[in-house]
Amino acid sequence: MFSVGSGYAGNGRETLPFNKNWQFYFAYNFEQNITKQKIDLPHTWNAAETLKGVAAYNRTSAIYENTLNVTEEMKGKRLFLYFEGVNSVAAVLLNNKFVNEHKGGYTGFCFEITNFVKQGANTVIVQASNAYRLDVIPLHGDFNVYGGIHRPVSLIITGQNCISPLDHGSSGIYISQQQVSAKSAKIKVLTKLSLVNNTGLSIRTEIYDKKKNVVASAIANLMDSHSAQYSQELNLNNPHLWDGKSDAYLYTVAVSLWKNEQLIDKVIQPLGLRFFHVDPDKGFFLNGKYLDLYGAGRHEDLASKGSALSNADQDNDMELIKELGATAMRLTHYPQNKYFYDLCDRNGIILWSEIPFVGPGGYTGTGYMKNKVLEDNIKTMLRELIRQNYNHPSIFFWGIFNELKLDYDDPEPFIRELDALVKQEDPGRLTTLASNLKQKEFNGLTDLMGWNKYYGWYGGNFDDIAKWADETHQIMPLVPISVSEYGAGASPFKHIEELTKPNPSGHFHPEEWQTAFHEKHWAALKQRPFVWGKFIWVLTDFGSSIRTEGDHNGINDKGLVTYDRKIKKDAFYFYKANWNPEPILYIAERRNNIRRKKTANIKVFSNMQTVELWLNGKFYSSKNTNNLKTVLWENVELQPGKNTILVKSIQGGKVLQDTCSWRRM
């Protein structure tokens, strides 16, 4: 039983976690005395079952139950249940009475339950469904739609008058950066309210710096009893800018509601002041300076947990991103956990965030039909994405779709509607898309464009990426272009001594091919600043039930890190050497430790200037690293049996070294 009241702060809002002691069972089970599983949130029922490698995994409905104990202290208060994500459709009941329904598994929603509860024990029931349907996106996609309450739940307690938590699951606060430069910042803060009456009410907005000093403030009395929102303008001189990884400086905006000088509600939001633009020839500029945007796509998916990640799991992924040295991430293919957006704000990671408007890619089917109910769902989810994440300074680009096709209903008129919706909701950011079609398809629908390219994996050769980029820039000189996906599958347990292209649909995905793919692609992309974003597919392996390839069915293995996050593949260290300035010395192909050829190439990824090679205890030679942070010794003769490889480099008087052993058969 979950109790509230004893810890309630009577002079303002309280938000309490509601994640413990739930009971779970599948719906439409008519047994008597059904067995119910005790679980904590977040939770999904598909984490293991999707790995069978069949598309028909269990997409059904399940029931989550809990008890909410409302005490005498709650009388006269308002109660709201806030869900960060229920996949894909959630029906919420209080004491067996229907409260409301939400369609969409990756955006939050908030329902008021004040009129549904009574003093004492109250039964909360959530029926969650991830069943296939044609009125809720995604209709398709190369990823799993894990069923369940896969993100946290909170109970929000307020007074009768409050800052509204009911505006599409948002904070109720919208911070617009009207004008920002190194000299000044003009900020508008729109607050949406939920009022019984406004007698004696006033609203205060304060901006705090990192030292908790108030640097700007505004206060106003609420005069219009019918007003559901209030706007205030604030100005800062010589603002400290949010400058990506180099200086992710955050202010804090506190909006409070007062009644006759008594605090009755307060909401805190982040503020990172920045300005940016994208040039078709020169790329991305943050605060007037060029910044190369490179990183990876990220699925919110982890072995044994599916999409039900904890904050610790989110922290771990952020540490991977930081170690990799990424400046940007594409959050694919859906809005992600609130906590992860906070991490990106604090760590200066620039984001492309999108809705799950996803086409079939290289498969059959469609991601769109000319169906008003479906279109309304897509618009709602786009509006929820924007409003719930409006204040995150890390978000720069709103993604509208991924890999739609043109063989069903033409989606282009509807995409124009979505682009217009974004500009209405948030004119301060840019729109983009990710296509796997030719250059002129979908052209002109969004501010920016991206393409998913896999030259050297799904056909073509590594060098084709350079040809494609130059050709696209020539065909579309006024359109800023990006590579929204590029990658190849790999197993850290499969290896080749000679570079031979594998079958992407087969089970043999050698690590060395993935590494060569990324070496060639990055060599081309780093020379082309007009490609405003370069996003590897993908940060980590992830679950996809339709996949029957690589080491394990049900997994897309294009990650730089394995599904369980335990092994960083060689390509991860290649990018770490190129993107992260921290000293690195790493022997590639180390896991290819059984050698049948008399000679071998020894490859090292390092951002040191010079690297020494020692073989079987004897100095071999030293070499300088090239512009791809790589050192290569070719045709090194191995002795029969065990060979010990040691590399060394000196940095600031300290010796950095790495070692491994290979056995020549």
Image (spheres, rainbow, N blue to C red):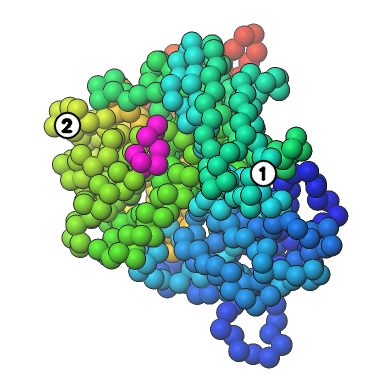
Tag 1's secondary structure? loop
Q: Amino acid at mark 2?
A: Met
Bounds of the magenta span? 422-429
- Residue carrying label 1: 199
Q: Dot 2, crowdedness within 10 Å: few (<14), some or many (≥20)?
A: some
Q: Dot 1, crowdedness within 10 Å: few (<14), some or many (≥20)?
A: some
| Residue 653 pos. (x, y %) | 64, 8
Q: Amino acid at mark 1?
A: Thr
Q: Tell me where residue 199 sits by quadrant.
A: top right
Foreground pick, 464 / 86: 86
What residue is drawn where x is 79% and y is 59%? 74
What residue is drawn where x is 64% and y is 49%? 197
Q: Tell me where residue 234 sits by quadrant.
A: top right
Tag 2's secondary structure? loop
Cα distance between the residues tagged 1 and 2: 58 Å
What residue is drawn where x is 58% and y is 22%? 249
